[in-house]
Amino acid sequence: MTRKKRRVIKPVKKVLPKILRCPRCGAISVIVKKQDDKWVVVCGNCGLRYEKPVTSQEYIDVYNEFVDAFNAGKIG
C-alpha cells in the first residue's frame, strides 16, 4: 500500500511596501531614504518633504511620523 502525499503549506511572510502613499496628493509615490545622518521622506508627485535625524527606528516608523506631522499641520 502506498501513502497519500501530504501537501506542505508554507507560511506567507508579509513584506512592508517600499513606496508609500502621500497624505497630501494621495499618490503612491513617497520614498523614505536614509541620507548620512537623517531620514528624508519625499513625495515624487507633489514634492512634499520631511526630514528627521537618524534614530534606531525603521523606515515605516519615520513614514508614520511624517503622516502624523502632516495631519497635525506641522508640514505642508
Image (tube, rainbow, N blue to C red):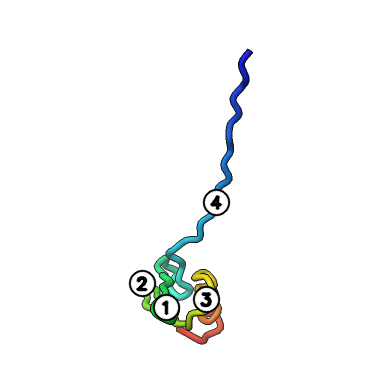
Percent x, y of residue 15: 51, 56
- Amino acid at dot 3: Val
Give the mark nearest the N terminus, 1 or 3.
1
Quadrant (top left, top right, bottom left, bottom right) of the N terminus: top right
Instruction: Say which label, 1 or 4, has the lower sequence index.
Output: 4
Neighbours of disc 4 within 10 Å: few (<14), some (14-19), many (20+): few
Q: How many marks?
A: 4
Q: Is residue 15 above or below residue 51?
A: above
In which image quadrant can residue 43 be found? bottom left
Q: CA distance from mark 2 to mark 3?
A: 16 Å
Residue assigned mark 3 = 67
Looking at the image, the residue that sits furthest to the bottom is: 74
Mark sitting earlier along the chain (2/3): 2
Mark 3 → mark 4, Cα distance in angstroms: 26 Å
Q: Which residue lies under the disc numbered 4?
A: 13
Q: Is residue 30 above or below residue 53?
A: above
The secondary element bearing badge 3 is classed as: helix
Which of the two labelled residues, at mark 2 and mark 4, occupies the earlier sequence position?
4
Task: Name the amino acid, label 1.
Answer: Val
Q: Which residue is mark 1?
A: 40
Q: Residues within 10 Å of mark 1 (few under 14, many from 20)?
A: many
Quarter of the image where the C terminus is located:
bottom left
Q: Amino acid at mark 2?
A: Asn
Q: In this orientation, which residue lies closer to the viewer: 67 or 31? A: 31
- Viewer-closest of 63 and 45: 63
